[in-house]
Structure formats: structure tokens, C-alpha cells
Amino acid sequence: MNLTVEIPDDLAGRLSAAGGANLSRRALEAFAADEYRHDRLTKPELQQLLGIQTSYDLDGFLKAHDISIELSSLHWPIETGWRSSRSLLLTTKP
């Protein structure tokens, strides 16, 4: 699907000069970031929409757009390991 946004030429020129990047790409990224922020896109969908190849690059995109990165899945092994170690300490007899 193609989406067209009408912007007056004088504004488009000024916005392009001020942003230093492709105005179409900036519009797409702003749209995608907002949709992700409102839970209307998943990370894989966001990655596909923007053509981002790696999770590392996706995290960079999220950080650049002030979107917090979900770390719960990264913390799970640490928390599980800590709980396992704690239970071993509590159940170990001298």
C-alpha cells in the first residue's frame, strides 16, 4: 500500500533542509514509532515496516525515538537463576 501526504512545497523544502534526511523516510519512521508506541505494531512488524535487518538496529531506532525497550525477556534468565540459587541456599543443610 502506498500512502501519500500532501505538504505545501515551501514547507516541504524547509522541513527537508532542517531534517537533513529524506522527508518521506522521516514521515514513515514517525508514523511507525507512534503506532508501536500505542501497541498497534509489534516489534517484528515494526522491523518489517522499516526494513530494519537486526534486533540491535531496531533497538537503536526505538532509543532514537525515545521508546523504552522491553527488557523483561532479557531479565528472565537472571531472575530465574537468582531464584534457583536462593532456593538452593535456603534448602541446603550444613
Image (spheres, helix red, strand yellow):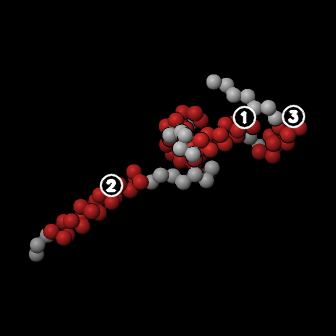
- Can you give x and y, in whole percent of width and height, for residue 23 in the image? 75, 37
**Placement of 54 over or under 78, stated as above or below:** above
Q: Which residue position is annotated with label 2?
A: 77
Which disc, if any, is residue 24? 1
Residue 88: image quadrant is bottom left
Q: Quadrant of residue 58?
A: top right
- Residue 58 visible in image: no
Q: Is residue 87 left or right of residue 32?
A: left
Dot 2 crowding, Cα within 10 Å, few <14, some 14–19, many 20+: few
Along the polypeptide, which appears first: circle 1 or circle 2?
1
Q: CA distance from mark 1 to mark 2?
A: 41 Å
Count of all numbered marks drawn on residues in the image: 3
Disc 3: which residue: 9
In the rendered image, the quadrant that contains the N terminus is: top right
Tag 3: residue type? Asp
Tell me if residue 78 comes above or below residue 1 in the rendering.
Answer: below
Residue drawn 89% across the image and 38% down it: 10
Q: Amino acid at mark 1?
A: Ser
Question: Residue 25, position in %: x, y?
Answer: 69, 36
Q: CA distance from mark 2 to mark 3?
A: 53 Å
At 21% across and 65% down in the image, what residue appears?
Answer: 87
Quarter of the picture containing the C terminus is bottom left
Where is residue 92, by image quadrant? bottom left
Point 33% across, 60% down: residue = 79
Of circles 2 and 3, the one toward us is 3
- Judge whether 82 appears above or below 38 on screen: below
Mark 1 crowd level (few <14, some 14–19, many ≥20, 10 Å Cα): few
- Please name the amino acid that badge 2 sits on: Pro
Mark 1 vs mark 3, CA separation in Å: 14 Å
